[in-house]
C-alpha cells in the first residue's frame, strides 16, 4: 500500500500529552517522577484509567492470565490477525512519566483518532498493556510479554515471588487483573512499540524519530580468578600468582573487545580478596556484561573474551572459571515493518535515523512470535529510570503520528 492510500488522520499531540501527564499523577513523586510498581494499588489505578479511556474510545477489553490487557478496536475483517501496539504502565521506584507509559498512551491516541474519525481498518487494532515490564518487584523483567513470546512458562511467571514472599499470581488476583484469557498462542499480524530512547543518541544527532532495527543481544558472566596469596615483600615479581593483576588485564581486554561498532562491554562488579595491602591478591570475583545487536558478532566477542582469559590465566599461572549466567539473544526486528517506520518518518518530513535498542523491551519478546518494530523518540539528556526523565511534546507527538501511519498501513495491507 502506498502513502496516498493512508487516511488523512493526524494524532492530537496536546491530548496525548495531557493523558500522559494525568497518568503520571498516579504514583507521582515530589520530584516530578512516578513510582508505580507492578501489581500494586497504584498499578491498578493506572490500569483502570487506561481501561476507562479505551472503552470511551469504543474498544472492548480482554485481560489474560498474567494481567496483560488488550484493548481492541474491531476491523472490517475480524478474522484477520490484529495489528498491535503497546508497552507497560509499571515503573521503577524512582521512574519517570514516559518509560512505558508513552507507548501505551500513544496506542490509546491511535485508538482515539480512529474512533473520532470513524476510520475502520481492515484488520483489527489492539493496544496491549504488558504486566511487570520493569522487573524491579518481580524479577526477571519483561516476564509477561516473555510468556506471550514463548520465552517463559505461565506457571513459572505466576510463581515468582517479591521480597515479601508475595507471588505474582497472588498480587495479580489482589488487584483484580487475573484475567481468563490464555497468554499468547494467537496470531498477531504485527507489533509496534513506541518508546523513549532512554539513551543520548537521537538528541545528540538532532533526530526526532529513531527507526529501531532491533535490540542488542546480551551475555552476562560471572568470572572467578584463583591465584595464590603470598607476602608482598618477600615474593619476587616473577614468581607471583596475582589474581587481581589477571582480572585487571581481562578488564582491559573486555574494553577492547567491546570497542567494535555497536559493541558494548562492562565490568560492573569486582571483589578482591583478601583485601590486605601487603598480601598478593589470591581470589577475585568479577562480572562481565557483553552486548551486540548481531548474534554472530556476540558469539565472536564471547570467543575472544574466553581466549583472552585463558591466555591471561596461563601467563599469570592462575585459574579462571567463567560462568555465563544469562543469555538474551539479539532481536532483529521485521525488515518490512522497520522499512514502514522509516518510510513514514521520511514522508512526514521528520529527521530520523536507524538505531539499535540498548535496553530490553516487551517488543523483544513479542518479536519471537510476531513481526515487530519499534519507534523511538528522544528523551532529555538521554536520562531514563530517573524522576527527571523528560521528553518534548513535539517529539512525543511525532512518534505517535509515525505509529499511527505504520499501524494503519499494516492493518490495510
Ligand atoms: Zn520501558
Image (cartoon, grey):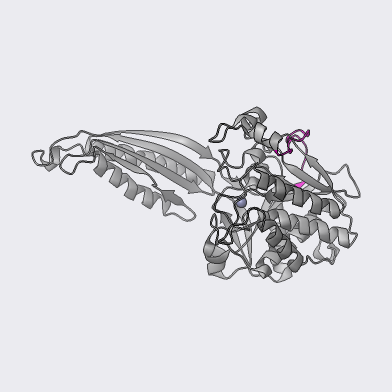
Q: Is 91 rendered above or below residue 168?
A: below
Could you tell me what secondary structure mostly forms the magenta stretch?
Answer: loop
Q: Is 22 rendered above or below residue 392?
A: above
Seen in the image, is 30 located left or right of residue 189?
A: left
Seen in the image, is 370 located left or right of residue 381?
A: right
The answer to whether residue 44 is seen in the rendering is yes
Residue occupying image coordinates x 69% and y 48%: 372
Please provide the residue range marked out in magenta: 175-190
Q: Which quadrant is home to the N terminus?
A: bottom right
Residue 362, horizontal then vertical, whole percent: 64, 46
Residue 101, horizontal then vertical, whole percent: 67, 54
Residue 380, horizontal then vertical, whole percent: 56, 66
Q: Nearer the viewer, residue 187 or 284?
A: 284
Seen in the image, is 221 located left or right of residue 227?
A: right
Residue occupying image coordinates x 73% and y 47%: 47
Residue 396, horizontal then vertical, whole percent: 67, 64
| Number of numbered labels in the structure image | 0
The answer to whether residue 344 is seen in the rendering is no
**Residue 12 inside the magenta-drawn segment:** no
**Residue 180 inside the magenta-drawn segment:** yes
Q: Quadrant of residue 221?
A: top left
Amino acid at each position: 500500500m502506498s502513502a496516498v492510500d493512508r487516511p488523512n488522520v493526524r494524532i492530537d499531540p496536546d491530548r496525548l500529552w495531557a493523558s500522559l501527564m494525568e497518568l503520571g499523577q498516579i504514583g507521582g513523586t515530589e520530584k516530578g517522577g512516578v513510582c508505580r510498581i507492578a501489581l500494586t494499588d497504584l498499578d491498578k489505578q493506572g490500569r483502570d484509567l487506561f481501561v476507562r479511556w479505551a472503552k470511551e474510545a469504543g474498544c472492548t477489553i480482554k485481560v489474560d492470565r498474567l494481567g496483560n490487557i488488550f484493548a481492541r478496536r474491531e476491523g472490517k475483517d475480524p478474522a484477520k490477525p490484529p495489528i498491535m501496539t503497546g508497552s507497560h504502565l509499571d515503573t521503577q521506584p524512582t521512574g519517570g512519566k514516559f518509560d512505558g507509559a508513552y507507548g501505551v498512551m500513544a496506542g490509546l491516541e491511535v485508538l482515539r483518532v480512529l474512533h473520532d474519525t470513524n476510520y475502520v481498518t481492515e484488520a483489527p487494532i489492539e493496544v496491549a498493556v504488558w504486566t511487570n515490564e520493569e522487573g524491579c518487584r518481580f524479577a526477571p523483567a519483561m516476564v509477561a510479554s516473555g510468556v506471550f513470546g514463548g520465552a517463559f512458562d505461565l506457571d513459572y511467571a505466576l510463581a515468582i515471588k517479591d521480597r515479601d514472599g508475595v507471588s505474582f499470581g497472588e498480587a495479580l488476583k489482589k488487584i483484580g487483573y487475573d484475567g481468563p484469557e490464555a497468554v499468547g498462542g494467537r496470531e498477531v499480524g504485527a507489533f509496534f512499540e513506541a518508546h523513549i530512547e532512554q539513551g543520548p543518541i537521537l538528541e545528540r544527532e538532532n533526530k526526532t524519530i529513531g527507526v529501531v532495527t532491533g535490540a542488542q543481544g546480551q551475555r552476562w558472566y560471572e568470572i572467578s580468578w584463583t591465584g595464590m596469596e603470598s607476602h608482598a615483600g618477600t615474593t619476587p615479581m616473577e614468581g607471583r600468582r596475582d589474581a587481581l593483576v589477571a582480572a585487571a588485564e581481562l578488564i582491559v581486554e573486555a574494553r577492547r573487545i567491546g570497542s567494535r561498532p555497536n559493541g558494548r562491554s562492562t565490568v560492573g562488579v569486582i571483589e578482591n580478596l583478601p583485601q590486605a595491602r601487603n598480601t598478593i591478591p589470591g581470589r577475585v570475583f568479577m562480572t562481565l556484561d557483553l552486548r551486540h545487536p548481531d548474534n554472530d558478532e556476540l558469539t565472536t566477542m564471547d570467543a575472544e573474551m574466553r581466549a583472552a582469559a585463558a591466555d591471561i590465566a596461563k601467563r599469570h599461572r592462575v585459574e579462571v572459571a567463567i560462568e555465563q549466567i544469562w543469555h538474551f539473544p539479539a532481536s532483529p526486528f521485521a525488515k518490512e515493518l522497520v522499512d514502514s517506520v522509516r518510510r513514514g518518518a521520511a514522508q512526514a518530513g521528520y529527521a530520523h535515523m536507524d538505531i539499535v535498542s540498548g535496553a530490553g523491551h516487551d517488543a523483544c519478546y513479542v518479536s519471537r512470535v510476531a513481526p515487530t518494530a519499534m519507534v523511538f523518540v528522544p528523551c532529555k539528556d538521554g536520562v531514563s529510570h530517573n524522576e527527571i526523565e523528560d521528553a518534548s511534546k513535539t517529539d512525543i507527538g511525532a512518534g505517535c503520528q509515525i505509529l499511527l501511519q505504520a499501524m494503519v498501513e499494516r492493518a490495510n495491507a
